[in-house]
Image: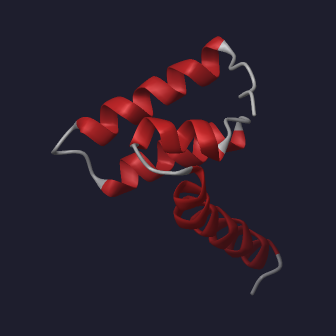
């Protein structure tokens, strides 16, 4: 399957993800924020996984769960829960 083209903005996010992933002092939170931002802007789990050296499925499982949890938390806050 051919991967979709990325915009220059998406490519910049992917480069930041790769750079943060390779820094030993980066916090997991910083990396997670970049990953979730990239995915929210349309970067596929496949492309994110490639930059992290993991499979699409691993990226989707780990960070997709985080993304769903955050959306649920935001929804609950908006409803006063």
**Rendered image quadrant of residue 72:** bottom right
Q: State left or right for residue 50 relative to residue 6.
A: left
Which residue is at the far left?
24
Q: Position of residue 19 (x, y in %)?
A: 32, 30
Q: Position of residue 68 (x, y in %)?
A: 69, 68
Q: State left or right for residue 12 relative to residue 10.
A: left
Classify 21 as above or below 16: below
What residue is at 70 percent from the left and 43 percent from the top?
A: 40
Which residue is at the far top?
8
Classify 23 as above or below 14: below
What residue is at 67 percent from the left and 35 percent from the top?
A: 43
Which residue is at the far right?
79
Number of dots carrying numbers: 0
**Rendered image quadrant of residue 70:** bottom right
Q: State left or right for residue 51 relative to residue 22.
A: right
What residue is at 71 percent from the left and 28 percent from the top?
A: 3
Pick whichever, 14 or 34, lies toward us: 14
Q: Position of residue 7 (x, y in %)?
A: 69, 16
What residue is at 61 percent from the left and 58 percent from the top?
A: 60
Quadrant position of the C terminus in the picture: bottom right
């Amino acid at each position: 399957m051919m991967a979709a083209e990325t915009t220059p903005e998406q490519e910049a996010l992917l480069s930041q993800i790769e750079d943060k992933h390779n820094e030993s002092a980066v916090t997991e939170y910083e990396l997670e924020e970049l990953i979730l931002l990239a995915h929210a802007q349309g970067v596929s789990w496949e492309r994110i996984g490639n930059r992290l050296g993991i499979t699409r499925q691993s990226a989707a499982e780990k960070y997709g769960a985080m993304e769903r949890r955050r959306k649920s938390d935001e929804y609950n806050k908006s409803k006063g829960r």
